[in-house]
Image (cartoon, rainbow, N blue to C red):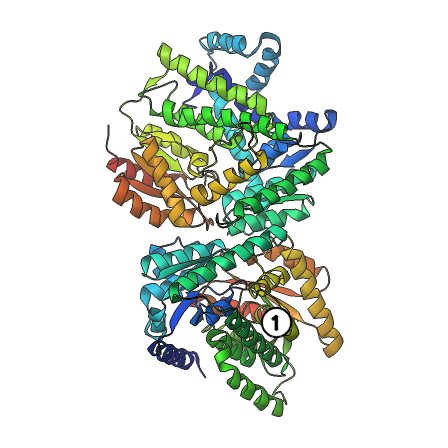
Amino acid sequence: MDVLELLSDYANYLREKKDQGKKIIGFMGHDNIPEELLDAAGFIPLKMIFAGNDDLMNASNDYLPPSTCSFAQSCIGLFSLNPSQYNFLNLIDQFIVSNHCVSDICTSEIITKYFNISRLNFYVSYTQGSEALKYFKLELVDIKHQLEKLIGREIRKQDIIESIKKYNSFKKKLSEINDLDISGSEKLKIFQKAILYGPVILPELDDFIQANRENQARKSKNSVDILFTGCSIFIGDYLIDLIEDSGGDIKYFDTWVGEAYFSQVYEEEDITSNDDPLDFFVQRFKNNKNGDHMVPNYFENKVAQIKEIIKKHQEENGKKLGVINHIIKFCDHINIFQSFLKKELQEEGIQVLNLERDYSRANRGQLSTRVEAFMEMM
Amino acid sequence: MSVFTDDVINFTSVLKMAYNFLSGRDYLKKQKFRERKKLISVVLPFSDLSFAAGAVPVFPIRMESFNINQYLLALNSATSILGWGLTTKLLGIIKHFDALKIFDSILDDVLKSINVKYNEMYDLGVESGISSDFCYGIKSLYGMHVSKGKNVDANMNISIRCSAFNKYYESLRKLVPRQIWIDIPPRNIGNALELLTENITKAISDLEDITGNHVADNSLNKQFRIGNQVKRYYKTIIYEISAEDFYPCNPATFAEILSLLGISFQDYNSNAQRYLENIANLVKEMRERIKKGIGMDVSKMPRILLTPVFGGWEPETQEYLYEQGARTLYADWEILGLLEEIPVSKGTNPVEEYARYLLNATTEGIGCDNNTLTDSYQRIAKKMNVDGIIFNQLFGCHSISNCYPMLREKVRKKLEIPITSISFNKIGENVEQIKTRLGAYMEIVKPI
C-alpha cells in the first residue's frame, strides 16, 4: 500500500466515523499523551505523524521563523496549504496544545488559533520526581474534565480501563510485528499505519503477523543492521527507502513511531486491580525514562539503552549494529545531544551516523551519499 | 569613539557596576578560597535562594578574565584611598585635560570586553559540541561552563517553557555534576503551587547540603527584601526615569545602563547588598543629574522598546538608533514577570511566596504559550508608553522568537505603534543588515 492509498483510506475511515457522529481530536503525537482517555470519551485520536516537503515548510513561514523544527513547520503547512490528500485534517474538531517541546506548543497553538480548531490543553513536567508525577495527575484530571465538558457526561472508569486494555493489546501486537524477520520498511509501514489508525486495525495486524510468520525466509541477509534512533520517520518520508537502497536494514526503531510507543505496556493483571485508571498513565509517565522530553537523565538513559540493545543484538545475531541518529533540523531535544551521543557510543566502538536533515527535496542526494558512506564503513 | 564618555565619567554607580562585572573573577576567587563560600551557577534572574543559603550565585561569564581598561583598574585603586565619589569627581576634572582622549575608551572598552568574551564563549560552545542551530544564549552559556564550570559547586536549573533550555541544563551535567532542579509546573492548576513549593523546599535542602548552612525563613525574607528593593529601583528606571523628557545622560548611555542592569540582575554581581546600594545610588544619581540639568533633552526622541535581548543581541543597535534620533529601552525581566516583588510580611511562608512568584512569572509573564507571552509584551509596551517596538529575532530560538508574527498582529491592531523585527545570530555578524532594516523602520516611527 503506498502513502496516497493509506491517506485516502484513512480519510474515508474518518469520514465514515464522522458520519456516525464521532469527533476527532488531533495532536502532535508524543509519548505522554493519554490517547486511551480520548478513546474512552468516544473521540478518535489523530496523531500528526506526517512527513513534510518544501511546500509545506515554506507555507509555515507566515507563522513561524524558518529556524523552526522542520516537522513543526510541515504540520502548519498541512493546515495552511491543505493539500488534497490531507484534507481529512479539516475533520478535526479539537486540537491538543501540549509541551512535548516548545515547537509543539507554538505549532499546536497556531493550528488552533489560525485554523479555527477548538483547543484543549495538556502540559507535562520535564522532570519525573514525586511532584512532577503529582502534577501529571493534575493535568490528567484536567483534560478528563475538558473532555467530559465536550461530551456532556462523565467518562466512566470502566471505559477508561477497557481503552487501556485495548491499547495494551494493540501495542503488544506491534511488539510481535517488531520481532518478525521482515525488512525495516515493511515494519515501518505497518507501524505508521497502526499508530495512525489505533487499535481498530488489530485484526489486520493479526493477519499481517500470520502471513509473515508463514513466510519468514528473507530475501537478503547481506544488509547492514541498523538501530534507528532520534526523530521518527513519519508517513510519506523517503528516508527508509534511502537507507535500504544503500544496503541498510533497520532492526530497531528506537523512536516514537516504533519501540518508544509500543513498549509502553502494562501487565494485564495490573490493569484490573488498580483503583484509579488515571494512575496507569502516571505510572507510564514515571516509567518513560528514555523519553526525549525528560530531564535530567534522558541522555544517560538513552546511551545505556542503546548500548544494551547493541550488546544483545551482537550476542543473538553475531552481527554488528550501526546507529543512525535521525535529527530533524532544529529539533531541540535530539539535536542538542547529537555530538555527545556520537562521542559516547564511538568510545565503545559503536559506529554512529548523525543524520541531520529537513524535508527539502534537495537534500536527498546528500543524504544518500552520507548513508551509503556509512553503510560502506559498517 | 564611544558616545558615552562624557556621561559616564561622573556616574559613580555605573562605573562601579561595570567594574564589579568585569572584576568578578578576583572577587569570586576570594569568595571561594578565602571565604570558603560555595559558588552556584545561575542563568536568568534566579539567584535569591543561593544568596539565602549563604552561597555565591554567579552568572558564569563573570568567572572569566576580562581585559579591564587600565584606567578603570587605576580608578578602582584610587577609590580604595579616596572613595568612589571623590575619585570620580577628580576624574571629571582630569577629563578636561585629557588631550590623549584616554577616557573616551573607558566604557567602550567595558562593553567591547564583555561582547568579545561572549563571542569567545559562543565559539567554545560550538567547538564543544553544541550545534550551531541553537540560539546565541545556549551556545555561549554552554561555552561558559566548558570554560569555567569546574569552579562552581552546583548549577541552579529552573525549568522554563523553552525545551532547548531545559535540555541545555541537562547537557551541563557532564561539566557540573551537581545540579539543583526546580521544575516549575507549566500551568497553575489544582495544587500546582503546593507542588512547586515542595520542589523549592527540596532545592533549598540541596543548597543546605552544599553549603552546610541552614536556610531559615528569616534568611529567605532578608534576601527577598533586598531583591524587592532592587526590583523597585529597576522599575523606577524603566517606568519613571525612562519616561522623562530630560535624561541624566544621552540616550545611548541610558540604553547601555539598562543593558548592564539586564545582565547584572541575573546574579546581582554575586553580592546582593552591594548591588542594592549600587542601583539605589544609580537612581539617586540619575535624579540629581536631571534636577541639576546635567544630561540631555530627549523630549523629541521617540522611545523604542528593543526586546527580547536576554538571549543575545547586537549591541550596536542602540547606538544606531541613537544616531537615528531614537532612544532605546530594554525591559526583558519586567516583561517576563521577573520584576514582581515577593511578599515578606509577617505570617507569610517565604518558600510558598517564592513559589508563587515563579509560578506567576511562568503563567502570566513568560506564559505557557505565545498568546500569554505576546500579551505580556503588549501590556508592558503599553505601560511604558513606548512609541515603537523592535523585536529581536534570535536565530535558533524556538520559544520566544516564535511569537513575533502573533505579536506583530496584536501590536498593529491594539497598540497601533510601529513594530519590526531584526535578526541576530552572533555579535558583530549582521550589523549592516540590521542598520538597513532599522533605517527603514525609523522612517515610519513618528517623530514626537
Question: Is residue A297 or residue B260 the one in the foreground?
Answer: A297
Residue at 24 percent across and 27 percent down: it is B448
User: Label 1 lies in what chain?
Assistant: A
Residue at 39 percent across and 70 percent down: it is A24
Question: Is residue A15 or residue B323 the one in the foreground?
Answer: A15
Q: Amino acid at mark 1?
A: Ile
Residue B309: quarter of image? top left
The C terminus of chain A - image quarter:
bottom right
- Asked if residue A308 can be seen in this view, the reply is yes
Local SS, label 1: helix
Residue at 69 percent across and 39 percent down: it is B150
> Is A8 located above or below residue B383 in the figure?
below
Q: Which residue is mark 1?
A: A271
Q: Which residue of the protein is positioned furthest toward the bottom in this rendering? A: A214
> Is A160 located above or below residue B370 in the figure?
below
- Asked if residue A360 can be seen in this view, the reply is no
Q: Could you say where residue A4 lies in the image, as x and y percent from the top left?
A: 40, 79
Q: Could you say where residue B29 lies in the image, as x and y percent from the top left?
A: 69, 28
Q: Could you say where residue B75 lies in the image, as x and y percent from the top left?
A: 57, 15
The N terminus of chain A - image quarter:
bottom left
Residue at 47 percent across and 69 percent down: it is A364
- Residue B439 is left or right of residue B138, and the answer is left
Residue B197: quarter of image? top right
Query: Label 1 crowding class (10 Å Cα cut-off): few <14, some 14-19, many 20+?
Result: some
- Residue A87 is left or right of residue B196, and the answer is left
- Residue B324 is left or right of residue B281, and the answer is left
> Is B400 located above or below residue B9 in the figure?
below
> Is B157 located above or below residue A196 in the figure?
above
